[in-house]
Image (cartoon, rainbow, N blue to C red):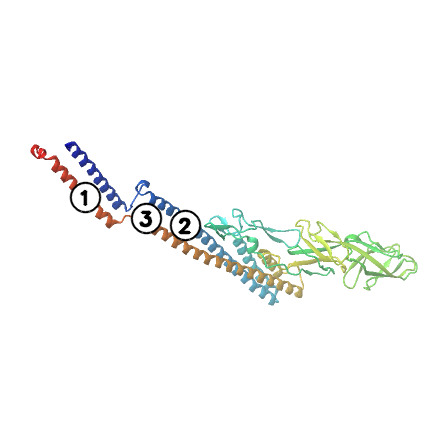
C-alpha cells in the first residue's frame, strides 16, 4: 500500500515543533531574567514542595531571631537599671558608714538628705519602663509594680508595697527554650532573708521565741490599764490612775506607807524605795515616783489608821503594734503573740518582765525591701526615734547589714542576667547559621543555573531556526519537486 504525506501534515508538524521550541525559549528567558528555575508547582512539583519546607523553616528561624533580639533588648534594659540600683545601694552603704562614724548631728542630717535623694532614684528605678512595659512587674507589665505610701499613725512612716506579679515573664524561643525577661520586683528589691528580731526600749519587754511574721519596723506601745493595791492599807488608785500611772507588772512594784499621825491622816509614801512623798487624808491625786521614773497617782483619803508597811501592787496594761487601734492585755508570759490590726503581721513578745509604760521599737532585720531600708536609714540619720548614742549606732549598723544584703542580691541577679545574655548570644549565632544554611539550600534548589540556561537557550534558538528553515524549504517546493 502506497502511503503519502500530504502538505497539511508538514504544516501541522512545523507549527507544533515551532511552538515547542518557542515555549522552551520563553521558559529559559524567564529563568534567566528572574533568576528562578521555577515559579509554579507544575514546573517542578518535587522541588516546589522542598522549597515550601525550606521557606517554612526560614520563617520559623526569623521569628526565633526576632524573639532573641526582643529578649536581649529587654534584658539589657533591665541590667542597666539594676546596675544603677546597685550603685545607689553602694552609695547608701558608704553614707551609712559615715553616719556611724559621725558624732555631729548636723553632719548626719546632711547625710540623711543624700540618702533621701538616693531613695527617690531607687523609686524611679522600681517604676522604670521599656517600650511602655514596666521592667519589674513580672508577668504584670501594664501597671506600676510598687505603691509608695507615707503613714501618719504609727512608725514606720513609710512603706513600699509590691503589687506586681510574683512570677517572671518569659520569652519563648523555638519550641523548647524559655528566657526570663521581665523580673518580679519583690525579688529584685528584697533582702536576703529574715534575721533575729530586735527590740529597743525601756518598758522591760523582750523578744519572745515565736516565729515573727512582721517586716521592716514597728512600734510596740505598752499602755497602763489598771492599778490594784493589795492588802488592807486603805490606799487606792486615784480617779486619773488608769490614764496616768506608768507602772506595769504583777509583783514587780511595792508602795511603802508610813503613818506618822497614827490615825491615817498624815504620813509618808514611797514607790519602790523612791523619794518619800508626804500625804494627808485630803489627797485624792497624789503623785509618787520611783527611782527609775515610774509614776503612780494615789488616793490617800482612806489610809488605815496606824498602817505602816509595804503594799504589793498589781499593775495591768496592754500591748499594741498599731498605735492603740487594737490592743492585747499583757499576759506576763514569755511568749505572748500579738498582731497588727491592718496588716495581720504577728510578733511574739516576752511580756513577763514588763515594768513600765512606753513605746519600744521593733526591728525585723533582713525583711525590709530596698525602699523601706533607705527610708529607715534616713530616719536613723535624723534620729527620728530619739535613740541614745549606743542604740543609734546599733541601729545604723543594722541598716548597713540590710544594705549589704540588698547589694548581694543585686549582684546575684546581674550575674544571672549576664549568663542569660551570653546564652542568647550563642543561640542567636546558631539561629543565624541555620538561616544561612536554609537560604543556601533554597538558592541551590530554586536559583537558575545561568551558564546552563544560556547554553540551553542557544540550543533552543538553533532548533527553532532549523525548524523555520525546514518549514520554509518544504513550503517553497514546486509541483515537480513535490511529485518527484
Q: Which residue is mark 2?
A: 61
Q: Which residue is mark 1?
A: 461
Q: Which residue is mark 3?
A: 445
Check contact, mark 2 vs mark 3: CB within 8 A. Answer: no
Q: Secondary structure at mark 3?
A: helix
Percent coordinates x, y for residue 404 in the rendering: 57, 63
Of mark 2 and mark 3, the one earlier in the sequence is 2
Instruction: Please name whichever residue, 305 or 459, is drawn nearer the observer in this view of the structure.
Output: 459
- Residue drawn at x 46%, y 57% as measured from the top left: 423
Percent coordinates x, y for residue 63 in the rendering: 42, 48
In the displayed structure, 51 sits above or below 209; it is above
Residue count near mark 2 (Cα–Cα under 10 Å), binned few <14, some 14–19, many ≥20: many
Of mark 1 and mark 2, the one earlier in the sequence is 2
Q: Secondary structure at mark 2?
A: helix
In the displayed structure, 381 sits above or below 139; it is below
In the picture, the quarter occupied by the N terminus is: top left
In the picture, the quarter occupied by the C terminus is: top left
Percent coordinates x, y for residue 169 in the rendering: 52, 50
Q: CA distance from mark 2 to mark 3?
A: 19 Å
Amino acid at each position: 500500500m502506497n502511503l503519502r504525506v500530504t502538505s497539511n501534515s508538514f504544516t501541522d508538524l512545523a507549527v507544533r515543533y515551532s511552538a515547542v521550541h518557542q515555549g522552551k525559549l520563553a521558559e529559559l528567558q524567564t529563568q534567566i531574567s528572574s533568576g528562578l528555575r521555577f515559579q509554579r508547582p507544575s514546573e517542578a512539583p518535587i522541588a516546589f514542595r522542598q522549597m515550601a519546607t525550606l521557606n517554612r523553616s526560614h520563617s520559623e528561624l526569623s521569628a526565633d531571631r526576632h524573639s532573641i533580639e526582643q529578649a536581649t533588648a529587654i534584658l539589657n534594659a533591665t541590667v542597666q537599671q539594676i546596675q544603677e540600683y546597685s550603685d545607689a545601694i553602694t552609695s547608701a552603704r558608704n553614707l551609712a558608714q559615715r553616719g556611724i562614724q559621725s558624732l555631729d548631728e548636723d553632719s548626719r542630717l546632711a547625710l540623711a538628705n543624700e540618702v533621701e535623694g538616693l531613695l527617690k532614684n531607687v523609686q524611679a528605678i522600681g517604676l522604670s519602663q521599656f517600650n511602655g512595659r514596666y521592667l519589674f512587674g513580672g508577668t504584670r507589665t501594664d501597671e506600676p509594680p510598687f505603691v509608695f505610701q507615707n503613714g501618719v499613725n504609727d512608725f514606720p512612716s513609710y512603706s513600699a508595697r509590691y503589687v506586681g506579679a510574683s512570677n517572671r515573664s518569659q520569652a519563648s524561643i523555638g519550641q523548647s527554650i524559655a528566657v526570663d525577661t521581665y523580673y518580679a520586683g519583690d525579688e529584685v528589691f528584697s533582702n536576703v532573708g529574715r534575721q533575729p528580731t530586735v527590740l529597743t526600749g525601756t518598758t522591760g519587754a523582750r523578744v519572745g521565741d515565736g516565729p515573727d511574721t512582721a517586716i521592716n519596723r514597728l512600734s510596740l506601745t505598752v499602755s497602763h490599764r489598771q492599778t490594784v493595791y493589795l492588802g488592807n492599807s486603805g490606799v487606792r488608785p486615784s480617779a486619773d490612775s488608769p490614764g496616768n500611772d506608768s507602772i506595769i507588772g504583777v509583783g514587780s512594784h511595792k508602795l511603802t506607807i508610813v503613818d506618822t499621825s497614827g490615825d491615817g491622816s498624815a504620813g509618808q509614801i514611797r514607790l519602790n524605795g523612791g523619794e518619800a512623798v508626804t500625804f494627808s487624808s485630803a489627797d485624792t491625786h497624789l503623785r509618787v515616783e520611783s527611782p527609775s521614773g515610774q509614776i503612780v497617782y494615789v488616793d490617800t483619803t482612806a489610809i488605815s489608821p496606824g498602817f505602816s508597811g509595804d503594799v504589793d501592787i498589781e499593775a495591768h496594761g496592754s500591748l499594741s503594734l498599731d498605735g492603740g487601734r487594737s490592743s492585747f492585755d499583757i499576759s506576763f508570759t514569755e511568749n505572748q503573740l500579738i498582731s497588727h490590726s491592718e496588716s495581720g503581721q504577728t510578733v511574739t513578745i516576752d511580756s513577763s518582765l514588763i515594768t513600765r509604760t512606753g513605746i519600744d521599737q521593733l526591728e525585723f532585720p533582713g525583711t525590709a525591701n530596698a525602699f523601706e531600708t533607705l527610708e529607715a536609714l534616713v530616719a536613723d540619720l535624723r534620729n527620728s526615734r530619739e535613740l541614745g548614742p549606743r542604740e543609734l549606732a546599733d541601729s545604723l549598723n543594722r541598716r548597713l547589714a540590710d544594705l549589704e544584703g540588698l547589694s548581694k542580691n543585686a549582684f546575684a541577679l546581674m550575674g544571672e542576667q549576664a549568663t542569660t545574655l551570653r546564652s542568647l548570644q550563642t543561640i542567636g549565632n546558631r539561629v543565624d547559621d541555620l538561616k544561612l544554611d536554609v537560604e543556601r539550600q533554597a538558592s541551590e534548589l530554586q536559583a537558575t543555573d545561568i551558564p546552563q540556561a544560556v547554553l540551553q537557550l542557544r540550543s533552543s534558538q538553533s532548533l527553532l531556526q532549523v525548524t523555520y528553515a525546514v518549514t520554509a524549504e518544504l513550503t517553497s517546493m514546486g509541483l515537480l519537486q513535490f511529485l518527484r
